[in-house]
């Protein structure tokens, strides 16, 4: 959430932790970039689908899109994070050689996020609002039973 909504914090208070010279390498940066790019490809297709549905102006189709897919237009960073968590849960090492295995977790990540945001806690909240809060991260961690 901070990476998306509080960029100045990332480049100020969190800079040393985020850009740790001991960890950063080309593959370290490239891996999440490629996965995120794949997520963005899916988002572009969804935006096209949404435009087509809106042009048809059939309320039933619009409502279905909004209830089942609208969140995907806002959840990219959370999808990426959830892919990481699922990889860890599935004992897939977070390294470039496992790129395909991690990319294959995108759909599962999206389903998990949808399950969470369909809970009462997020009822009546618009996706853009949900994904500006970090509490979703806590719910993902809780859902996956990750111990930090």
Image (spheres, rainbow, N blue to C red):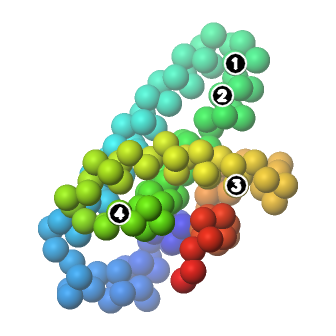
Report x, y in % for residue 148.
Answer: 54, 83
Viewer-closest of 134 and 55? 134
Q: Please say if the residues under marks 1 and 2 sit with CB atoms less than 8 Å apart.
A: yes
The picture places residue 60, in percent across and down from the top left corner, at 76, 17
Q: What's the distance in space between the residues labelled 4 and 3, CA to CA?
A: 23 Å
**In the displayed structure, would residue 53 be above or below residue 35?**
above
Front one among 140 and 37: 140
Q: Residue at the location (31% across, 67% down)?
A: 93
Of labels 3 and 2, earlier in sequence is: 2
Measuring 60% from the left and 14% from the top, which residue is drawn there? 55
CA gap, disc 3 and disc 2: 17 Å
User: N-terminal of the two: label 4 or label 3?
Assistant: 4
**Disc 3: CA contacts within 10 A as few (<14), some (14-19) or many (>=20):** some
CB-based contact (under 8 Å), mark 4 and mark 3: no
**Which residue is disc 4 drawn over?**
92
How many other residues sit within 10 Å of disc 2, few (<14), some (14-19) or many (≥20)?
some
Task: Kindly identify which residue carries mark 3.
Answer: 116
Label 3's element? helix
43 displayed left or right of 61:
left
- Pinpoint residue 66: horizontal percent, then vertical percent: 69, 33
Q: Disc 1 or 4, which lies upstream in sequence?
A: 1
Q: Which mark is residue 143?
A: none
**Mark linked to residue 61:** 1
- As measured in the structure, the alpha-carbon distance from the residue carrying label 2 to the one carrying label 4 is 32 Å
User: Residue at position x 60%, y 65% from top?
Assistant: 144
């Amino acid at each position: 959430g901070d990476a998306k909504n509080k960029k100045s914090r990332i480049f100020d208070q969190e800079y040393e932790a985020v850009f740790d010279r001991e960890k950063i390498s080309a593959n370290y940066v490239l891996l999440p970039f490629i996965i995120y790019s794949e997520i963005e490809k899916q988002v572009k297709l969804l935006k096209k689908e949404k435009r087509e549905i809106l042009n048809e102006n059939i309320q039933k189709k619009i409502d279905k899109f909004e209830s089942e897919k609208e969140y995907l237009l806002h959840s990219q960073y959370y999808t990426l994070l959830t892919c990481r968590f699922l990889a860890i849960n599935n004992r897939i090492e977070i390294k470039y050689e496992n790129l395909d295995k991690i990319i294959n977790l995108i759909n599962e990540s999206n389903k998990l996020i949808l399950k969470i945001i369909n809970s009462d806690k997020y009822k009546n909240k618009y996706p853009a609002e949900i994904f500006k809060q970090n509490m979703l991260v806590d719910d993902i961690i809780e859902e996956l039973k990750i111990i930090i």
